[in-house]
Image: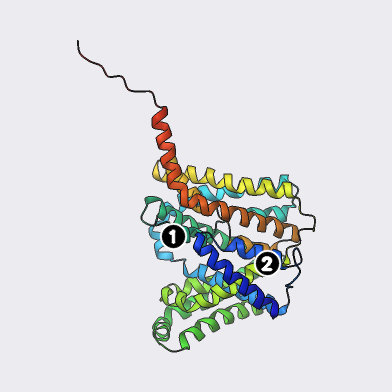
Amino acid sequence: MEGIVLALFICLVLALISKYLSVPAIPFYILAGVVLGKAGLGLVASDEISHFFSQMGLIFLLFFMGLGLKIDRIVANRSAVLTSGIIDLNVNMIIGFAASYLLGFTLIESLIVAAAFYVSSTAMALTSLIDNRKLMMKEADTIIWLMVFEDLVMIIFLAIISAGDQNLIIFAVKILFVLGILYTLAHYGKEFLIAILDRDDELPILFTFAAVLTTASFSMYLGVPETMMVIALGAAFATTDPDAFEQHARPFKDVFLVVFFVFFGVTINLSGGADWFVIGVICILAILSKLISGVLTGIFIHHSALSGLEIWGNTIGRGEFSIALAVLYGSPLVGTTIAAMVIVTSIVGAFMAKYATFLRRGIVGLGRRSAPPRRVHTKH
């Protein structure tokens, strides 16, 4: 318990510093865990209490992800979602998988690293758009739809990788059964849910907390991935009053997620065979691959490679979902690699998101200066 208190106090200080500097706090939380854990000072160790809080952070993160999946808006904007999403998926997943496999990871490890390599941090992307006052720029919608598409891909990925050796037909039936229950309750109990959320006592918070944990527990009992079902719960609740659910679940998510990142850092063992050359190559490629996909998206969607620089700057950072994949399915070596990638890309992404506009202007200005002067023809 003392370790959690110490970790939270240090993270409070780091959160204040990161807000002051306008940079993401996630890499600092992970670094704090590395310094406090067995790879550093050895002051904090992972135990059952920290594991429970970390699991809560992961579950509420996934619930929030589901709340952001508004199916009607996705269908209405399916062209933009598909075009930008398919480019992003193909470029980053292929580069991530090929690089990981060629650098010595096993087939399964390469798949996990590639998924973490592919998915950008939704929290970082949206925060950078808000903090840098870029929500009104034309590329903002494209960035948001990219995040939505990545979330949808991750849901499918979680379903496939969670199946393991199970009979796929039985596994699919179980998932459809739970999904049917969730959407039936959300559809026919919509008025009841809204009535609960409109109350000004503790009931809305208690109901939200209990609904998330009950769904996770019920899913585990049936043998289906609780990660996927919690996302489905959020998507079902998004058809009622998602803003109210976000408001009531945010305190749990924000606090538990800090513990999740810190104790992920605590468990990292830097002496456990990590190859820093391999990690360095993965980090560099993670930045460059998003540049390629960003520029291609800018060309296809906005007919401008310079628009791609804005998309790139706001999608470089990998974060919460990449770490979740490492925790759920990664080996110690994979976890160290993904942690380093998250730290490097989130820091680089924070600065590129902030200065991408200045970079665009600089390129435009350079192009104008290097262009040959126009000849003025005069009549004689």
Q: Residues within 10 Å of mark 2 (few under 14, many from 20)?
A: many
Residue type highlighted by circle 2: Gly
Secondary structure type for disc 1: helix
Total residue callouts: 2
> How dense is the environment of label 1, judged by Cα within 10 Å: few (below 14), some, or many (20 and up)?
few
- In this view of the protein, which residue sits in the foreground, 295 or 33? 33
Indicate the quadrant where residue 17 lies.
bottom right
Q: Which residue is mark 1?
A: 131
Please report whichever mark, 1 or 2, sits nearer to the chain's N-terminal start. Answer: 2
Q: Is residue 31 left or right of residue 82?
A: right
Q: Position of residue 142 (x, y in %)?
A: 43, 53
Question: Which residue is found at the position 62% from the left and 53% from the top?
Answer: 344
Residue 294 appears anywhere in the view:
yes
Q: Please state if 154 lies on the left or on the right of 240 as rendered.
A: right
Residue position marked by numbered label 2 in the rendering: 33
* Residue located 56% across and 63% down the image: 25
Report whether residue 118 is seen: no
Q: Quadrant of the N terminus?
A: bottom right
**Which amino acid is tagged 1?**
Asp
Q: x%, y% of residue 281?
A: 68, 45
Q: Nearer the viewer, residue 343 or 186?
A: 343
**At which x and y percent is residue 68?**
46, 67
Image quadrant holding the C terminus, namely: top left
Residue sticking out furthest to the top: 380
Say if 77 sits above or below 251 in the image: above
